[in-house]
Image: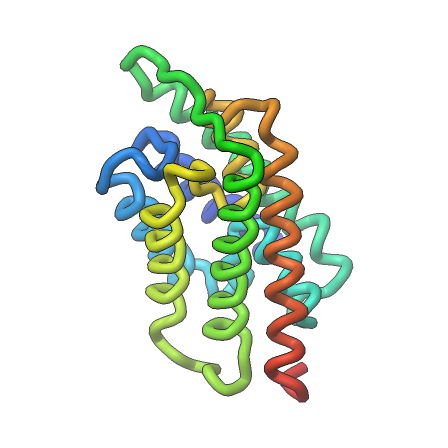
Amino acid sequence: MRKYATEFIGTFFLVLTIGCTGIAAGRGVIPPLAIGAILMVMIYAGGHVSGAHYNPAVSLGAFVRGRLAAADVAPYWGAQLAGAVAAAPTVLFFKTAPPQAPFVAPVAPGFTAELLFTFALAYVVLNTATARATAGNSYFGLAIGFTVLAGAFAVGDVSGGAFNPAVAVGASMMGILPWKMLWLYLIADLLGGAAAGLVFKFLNKGDE
């Protein structure tokens, strides 16, 4: 239960920060900085309890890599989605500005951007937070947060910069992303996470 509560809390504050900074992530400098920072500090806060995934795609990558039990996948996803769903009305309660139109990603570029940078995020998580060769390092949270920061700057104006199915659900609830595009984030992000798990296993044979 402690693991799932940690995943809920971390995902809640990640989605809360995304909503309060008003992304799509490509609009301005402050949102990517705030999002990368909150992810970093929540990873340092919860990494020793749950692994601090805060992202169903990362949890899928950890499962494929062999560092998350099959019995934990659904509860992790449930806790992450619950955190996102709880954050969305909190953001709407805070907001007083008129709503902006949702960010609509072009399908092919948006799908590709989400897949690539979700792969990058999960790949960094697996290599800095689960690999035997990097065990005990103190930089894993910084590396993971900066991956999201870089992705938001690089392709935030292409895909909206979710890189996380739970974020996509929360952003859709807040009107930041359109519901009709949710499939793009779910499929691309989960594919990116699974691909990272497979690539990790290929490049780190014997690290089970």
Query: Would residue 118 be found to the left or right of residue 191 on screen?
Result: left
Question: In this view, which residue lies farthest toward the front?
Answer: 108
The residue positioned 76% from the left and 61% from the top of the image is 70
Percent coordinates x, y for residue 51 in the rendering: 53, 64
Is residue 89 shown to the viewer in this render?
Answer: no
Q: Is residue 138 left or right of residue 49?
A: left
The quadrant the C terminus occupies is bottom right
What residue appears at the point 39 percent right and 79 percent down from the top-left corner? 137
Above or below, 50 relative to 99: below
Where does the image place residue 157, in percent across and percent down from the top left? 37, 37
Query: Up-down: is 85 above or below 155?
Result: above
Q: Residue furthest top?
A: 98
**Residue at horizontal 42 percent and vertical 59 percent from the top:** 43
Q: Tell me how many marks there are.
A: 0
Query: Who is closer to the viewer here, 169 or 93?
Result: 169
Compared to residue 173, the image places residue 200 above or below, namely below
- Which image quadrant is residue 101 in? top left
Give the residue at the far right of this rendering: 71
Write down the quadrant of residue 29 in the picture: top left
Q: Residue at x 53, y 23 (%)?
A: 178
Q: How is the image coloured?
A: rainbow
Q: Position of residue 10 (x, y in %)?
A: 46, 48
